[in-house]
Image (spheres, grey):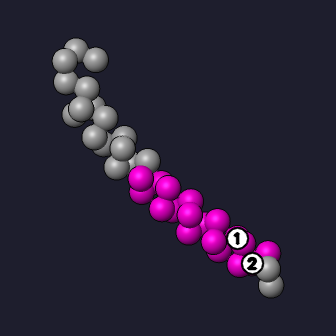
Amino acid sequence: MDGKPYREWAVPAKFVRSLGKVFGALRKAIFRRAEN
């Protein structure tokens, strides 16, 4: 937080975005499994 927060937040943002994709796929797989 010393003047350049963007560089420190760029990686976590990408990480969170990819995590969201993974969790979305997992949720779909689990939901499909529960349906059958």
Give the percent coordinates (x, y) of residue 21.
Answer: 48, 62
Relative horizontal placement of residue 36, taking residue 6 as reference (left or right): right
Q: Amino acid at mark 2?
A: Arg
**What residue lies at 28% left-to-right and 40% top-to-bottom?**
10
Give the percent coordinates (x, y) of residue 9.
Answer: 31, 35
Mark 2 secondary-structure assignment: helix
**What residue lies at 48% left-to-right and 54% top-to-bottom?**
19
User: Mark 1 highlights which residue?
Assistant: 30
Q: Is residue 20 magenta?
A: yes
In this rendering, is residue 29 above or below 4? below
Relative horizontal placement of residue 35, taking residue 23 as reference (left or right): right
**What residue lies at 28% left-to-right and 17% top-to-bottom?**
1
Query: Within 10 angstroms of label 2, few (less than 14), some, or many (20 or more) residues?
Result: few
Q: CA distance from mark 1 to mark 2?
A: 5 Å
Q: Amino acid at mark 1?
A: Ile
The magenta region covers 17-34
Label for residue 13? Answer: none
> Quadrant of the rendered structure where residue 5 is?
top left
Q: Quadrant of the C terminus?
A: bottom right
Query: Within 10 angstroms of label 1, few (less than 14), some, or many (20 or more) residues?
Result: few
Label for residue 33? Answer: 2
Residue at the limit of the structure toward the bottom, as seen here: 36
Q: How many marks?
A: 2
Q: Is residue 5 magenta?
A: no
**What residue lies at 22% left-to-right and 34% top-to-bottom?**
7
> Quadrant of the rendered structure where residue 23 is?
bottom right
The reply to whether the C-beta atoms of the residues labelled 1 and 2 are less than 8 Å apart is yes
Mark 1 secondary-structure assignment: helix
Prevailing secondary structure of the magenta residues = helix
